[in-house]
Every structure is written in C-alpha cells, then in structure tokens.
Image (spheres, rainbow, N blue to C red):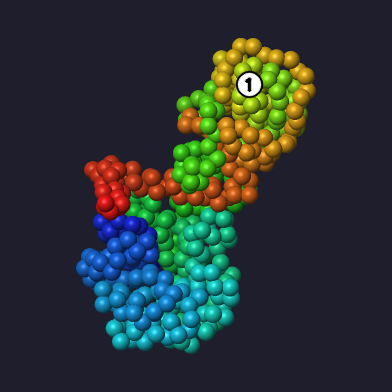
Amino acid sequence: MPVLQIALDLMQLNRAVAIAHEAVDGGADWVEVGTPLIKSEGAEAVRTLRREFPGKTIIADTKTMDVGGVEVEIMAKAGANIITVLGLSEDSTIEEAVMAGRKYGAEVMVDMINVPDKVARSKEVEKLGVAYVCLHMGIDTQMKGAEPPIDTLKKVVETVSIPVAVAGGITAENAGLYAEAGATDIIVGGAIIKTGDIKGAAENVKKAINGAKIDAGISKKYTEDELFEAFSKVSTCNISDAFHKQGVMIGILPQSLQHRQRMVGRALTVQTANGDWAKPVEAIDHVKEGDVIVVDVGGAPVAVWGELATCSAMVMGAHGIVIDGAIRDIDDIRDLKFPAFSRTVAPCAGEPKGYGGIGIEVTVGGQRVRTGDWIIGDESGLIVVPKEMAVEVANRSLDVHERENRTREEIKRGSTLSKVNELSKWEPVQ
C-alpha cells in the first residue's frame, strides 16, 4: 500500500511541528521537511522533526543541484532518512549523493521537476543507484492548470524497478488515481497543511489512497472553463495579494452591491464622452452571458448609465457595469441587485451622440482593460486580470485564500497574526 508523505512547505518551524503532529495523527506515514522550511530554518528543522518523530521516515527536500555529497551528509547527520536531488543535476552530483548516503545511512530520491524526458531520465538515475524517483509537478506549473501526469507516472512505473513517488497538486480527490497508477509514495502538501482540520484532511487523503471517493474541495486547480467558479470563491483582496497588487482600479467604487455580493465576468469594453450614453447602451446588444460592461468616460461628471440600461443589460445576461465616470438611478439599481461600480453618482444624464467605440482597449481606474479580460469586484473594490493570465491568477488567489483559512484557525486557537507569521523574526536585520 502506498505511503502518505506530508510535505511541510512552511517558513516557520513551530507551525510545521504542530501541523506534522496533527497530520501523523491523521495517518501520514512519512514527514517531509519542505524546501521552504529548510531554507528558512536550516538543518535544525530536520533535527527538530527527527526528535519529534523518532520512529518516522524523515525526508529532507533539499532539491540539491550541486555538491550532492556535502548536502546529503549534512541532512543525513541531522536525521534525514531520504534526501532529494534534482534530476536536472549532473550525473556526478547524483553519484556523489548516493555514495554519501551509503556512508551516512541515508537514501537519495531524485526529483524529476522540469526534466524534459522523465521516463528516460528515471531509467538513467536508477542505474546511478538512487532509491526513489519522484514525479513532481511544481506549484508554478500547477497554477497554470496543468493536468496531473498520470500517463507519465504509468510509463515510469513500467520502466524502473525502484519505488516511484508523486508530488504536486495531489488532493483527496485525485490521490487514488496516483495510487492506482503505481505510485508507492503519495506526497501531499497544500491539501493538508492549508486546512483548519489537519488531522481530518490527512485522514481523507489516506482514505482516498485506499480507494475511497472523497470530495474535500481543497487545493483544487481550476482550468479556463472553470474561471467563473474560481474567481467567485475569492475576494479582490486575495487576488491583489496573489497578483502582487497589479490590476487594482483606483477610485472606482461599489455603488449597488449587496453585502458579500461579488461581481465576476469578462469585460466588454466601451469608450464614450461626458454624458454620451449611446455607446454604453448600444454595447448591451453585444453582451454575452456573464459579461461585465466596462465604460471609459475619463472620469467625466455627467451620467452615462441608469436604471433602464440596467434592466436591459440584465435581460441580456450581463453580470455588472463598471464606469470610470458617473452613474445615476442608484436606488433603483440597488433594488435590482445588479452590481454597479462607478467613480461618481449624479442625477443628470447627457444625450446619445454616439462618440467612442465598443470592444476597444480602454483605461479605467488607471488600468488597461481589453474585451475578454476578467473583471472581479466586491465591497473592497475592483480588479482587472488579463485574460492570458487568468487561470494562473485564479489558482494563486485560491491558494492565498486557503492559506488564510489555516492562519485564521491558528489565531482562533489562541495565537495572533504576528505570532503565526513570526514577524519580528523575519524583519530586516538592523
């Protein structure tokens, strides 16, 4: 039966120890000192977890690329049973790592992340004496919605005689697929460590490995066809954190949102002049289900949208209106529960003169917007996400949201935000 390896990809050792104990209580078999933890806490993280779990297999995920012998010696002496070396390394690096492992009583696992031909390389490193190969889909690749490498796993299992581990994007929903395909070591990080109930999450993955069908909804990665659902699960604050503060529309405020209502949709862009409501209204005839009409009026003060336009847009399936300018009839629009964002509100409307255009690139709230870009709005504000980056940004935003859920759980247990993140420890040295 495959083992469950818990990947402690955290910066803080105290948090990692607590999470590891809960995961082991839930059935985790092996404990991995993740790469971020090793980089932040050094070999002491391995020593600490060895003391905490004297009877468990400890993996040091060093992802060694050079001086394999030295790094294996360090981690083996600290208490690691298995040390990882990258498959992209020189053969000599892997050979040195293997020989050092034999000397100090540890084994080497070769991580195939970003190796072009994983099947061929697995066969090569087996001949070099490694104990395991690991098919690893990196987090940055996962965020782009890549498919799980089940077919590659099957080929590697058929090619080599040593155990094959898998890592990256594994959840309670898909862990069973990897077990069925022949993986002997199922490595799970986020789907366990980002939850409030670590023990329960580990139990679910363990059940899945044993053949149960689980729908936990944690660490799911979304594709292009699922972006409405993905963006609906996160706040603009989550997106801003994940998108490094890019895309925030400054000065465009929610005017009609209900509490906790979110607006999600693809932009249909409009450019017009002060008070000229012809193009915004004509754009309604071009709306596809789920579109958000985004109007550039250059911040002008005379309204170009009101209640009748809103009724018409709702009939066509629009998800909202964004105006870098003025809107009116806000009381009626609120009654309709139609998401509306604008720079200002004014009672006066202009005349339909027909200046501007539909579907052209515009600037709203200081951000470039093109038709097809994603617009997300809530009570905190508005963000535009370029369509080419939408899958990655959505998945990274969900990761932020899930990690916040874990932090919130630790605060509820009596910690504080500064203690959870060990802020004073990570402040710049003066």
Give the quarter of the image for residue 103: bottom left
Q: SS for tag 1?
A: loop
> Does the image show residue 315?
no
Q: In the current view of this chain or complex, which residue is farthest to the left?
A: 51
Q: Position of residue 313 (x, y in %)?
A: 68, 26
Judged left or right of residue 309, residue 111 is left
* Residue 345 visible, this angle: yes
Q: The residue under label 1 is which amino acid type? A: Ala
The residue nearer to you, when weighing 238 against 168, is: 238
Give left or right: position of 279 versus 225: right
Residue at mark 1: 300
Looking at the image, the residue that sits furthest to the front is 430
Q: Residue 285's image quarter?
A: top right
Q: Nearer the viewer, residue 98 or 171?
A: 98
| x, y percent for residue 157 | 52, 77
Q: Position of residue 144 (x, y in %)?
A: 57, 55
Taking the view exactly as shown, the residue that stands out farthest to the top is: 347
Residue 51: percent from left, percent from top: 21, 68
User: Quick check: 78 above or below 194?
Assistant: below
Q: Quadrant of the N terminus?
A: bottom left
Above/below status of 263 relative to 104: above
Q: Give the residue displayed 58% in from the left and 76% down from the top.
A: 117
Residues packed near mark 1 inside 10 Å, few (<14), some (14 to 19) or many (20 plus): some
Numbered-mark total: 1
252 to the left or right of 47: right
